[in-house]
Image: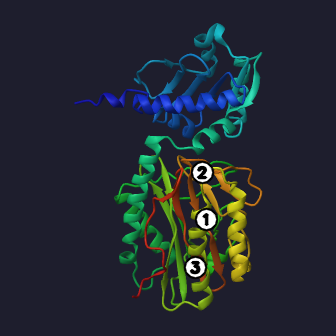
């Protein structure tokens, strides 16, 4: 029997959809925007529960209109099929807005140039900024999906020790983990917003490769297997006395969790053990502070204080090259708001979902430290990636 959901454009239930629409409109009101038009996959998924080729036109008042090019046969109130964006104006008619939001941060210049003439008298607003703030606070269905992704990611990580075989390289182990992730239902999609950052199913760093700088604004780098994708595993053999940091894909349903754990072979030096424990201590301290209303930069400052007191600054968030943040929002994309950084202007809000990743690179040994994903509640912080945090040894 054919599933009617295959053809219904809006896949969220009505309460969820209405809450998401209300959140968008609330932020539109704050920025004096009368309408926005969305075409970015992440934002289309946020409002409809699916990705399609086309545009979502959301007015501050009145019903949204969904202009679809592909796939065919989608149905529902507000669905209008078009061949090209110039056909949008026929459906908007006399209700053309005085201010229009377009995703100018993420859409190609050519697409923006085709959309702007549709609203010749409208003042341009940045819909990308509006939607980043909307998506920073997760609605109920998103929280459920994030918890589910966290549970499944933890289950995958629990099986990683059984994948290791003597003589493996970091690349061999990463392929084995990727295979396991996919068999456990990982979608494989790793959505990243902004500045051409690219990654395939996560990052695995062994030994000295953890100290290789990357061109991307990631917490950890790695040389990669080819200059066309210069990040992550590079074929380094996993040898005694070195670590393997695993930061793999947690996207099992469209919402991503982010988790890092450290594995090792043989005995590690005391500096690496001290730094790993420091990372755990930072998590504990920041979870005590991470309540609605606190400035994100204060979390950075507290972590920096802990690291300085431990004498670990040279290794913090990299060694040869340092990252400028220790945490970030996660959701439909892996790098959402808020950002935990020294100059962040973000304020922590209830139902932010935040990945904290205070990490260290110890020369010749490798990377240490953990990453967890947390939901911020009014009175507590909920960890949704509760896997063991100590270093896990392959040979014990």
Q: Are marks 3 and 2 in contact (CB under 8 Å)?
A: no
Residue at the spot 62% in from the left edge and 21% down from the top edge: 60
* N-terminal label among 1 and 2: 2
* N-terminal label among 3 and 2: 2
Q: Secondary structure at mark 3?
A: helix
Q: Are marks 1 and 2 in contact (CB under 8 Å)?
A: no
- Identify whether 33 is placed above or below 87: below
What residue does disc 1 label? 286
Residue at the spot 56% in from the left edge and 16% down from the top edge: 62
Q: Choose between 62 and 383: the one closer to the eye.
A: 383
Identify the disc placed on residue 192: 2
Taking the image as drawn, is residue 133 in sight?
Answer: yes
- The residue most toward the front is 379
Spatial separation of the CA atoms under disc 1 and disc 2: 25 Å
Identify the disc placed on residue 276: 3
Q: Position of residue 161 (x, y in %)?
A: 39, 77
Q: Quadrant of the C terminus?
A: bottom left
- Identify whether 277 is placed above or below 254: below
């Amino acid at each position: 029997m054919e599933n009617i959901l295959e053809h219904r454009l809006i896949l969220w239930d009505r309460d969820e959809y209405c809450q998401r629409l209300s959140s968008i409109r609330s932020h539109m009101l704050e920025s004096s925007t009368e309408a926005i038009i969305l075409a970015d996959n992440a934002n289309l998924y946020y409002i409809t529960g699916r990705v399609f080729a086309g545009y979502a036109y959301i007015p501050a008042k009145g019903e949204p209109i969904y202009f679809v090019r592909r796939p065919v046969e989608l149905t529902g109130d507000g669905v209008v099929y078009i061949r090209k964006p110039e056909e949008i104006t026929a459906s908007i008619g006399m209700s053309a807005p005085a201010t229009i939001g377009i995703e100018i941060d993420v859409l190609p210049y050519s697409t923006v140039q085709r959309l702007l003439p549709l609203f010749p008298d409208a003042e341009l607003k940045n819909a990308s900024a509006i939607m980043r703030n909307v998506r920073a606070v997760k609605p109920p269905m998103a929280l459920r999906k994030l918890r589910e992704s966290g549970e499944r990611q933890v289950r995958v990580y629990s099986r990683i020790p059984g994948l290791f075989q003597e003589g493996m390289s970091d690349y061999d182990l990463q392929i084995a983990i990727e295979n396991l992730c996919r068999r456990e239902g990982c979608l494989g999609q790793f959505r990243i917003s902004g500045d051409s950052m690219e990654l395939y199913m996560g990052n695995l760093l062994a030994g000295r490769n953890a100290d290789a700088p990357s061109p991307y604004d990631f917490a950890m780098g790695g040389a990669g297997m080819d200059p066309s994708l210069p990040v992550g595993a590079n074929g380094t053999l996993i040898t005694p006395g070195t670590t393997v940091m695993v930061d793999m894909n947690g996207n099992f349903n469209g919402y991503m969790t982010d988790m890092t754990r450290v594995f090792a072979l043989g005995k590690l030096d005391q500096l690496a053990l001290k730094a790993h424990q420091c990372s755990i201590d930072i998590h504990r301290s920041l979870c005590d502070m991470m309540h609605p209303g606190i400035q994100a930069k204060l979390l950075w400052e507290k972590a920096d204080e802990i690291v300085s007191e431990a004498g670990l600054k040279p290794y913090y968030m990299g060694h040869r090259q340092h990252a400028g943040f220790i945490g970030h929002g996660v959701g439909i994309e892996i790098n959402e708001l808020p950002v935990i950084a020294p100059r962040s202007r973000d304020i922590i809000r209830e139902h932010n979902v935040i990945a904290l990743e205070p990490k260290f690179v110890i020369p010749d040994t490798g990377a240490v430290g953990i990453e967890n994903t947390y939901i911020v509640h009014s009175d507590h912080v909920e960890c949704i990636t509760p896997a063991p945090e100590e270093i896990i040894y392959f040979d014990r």
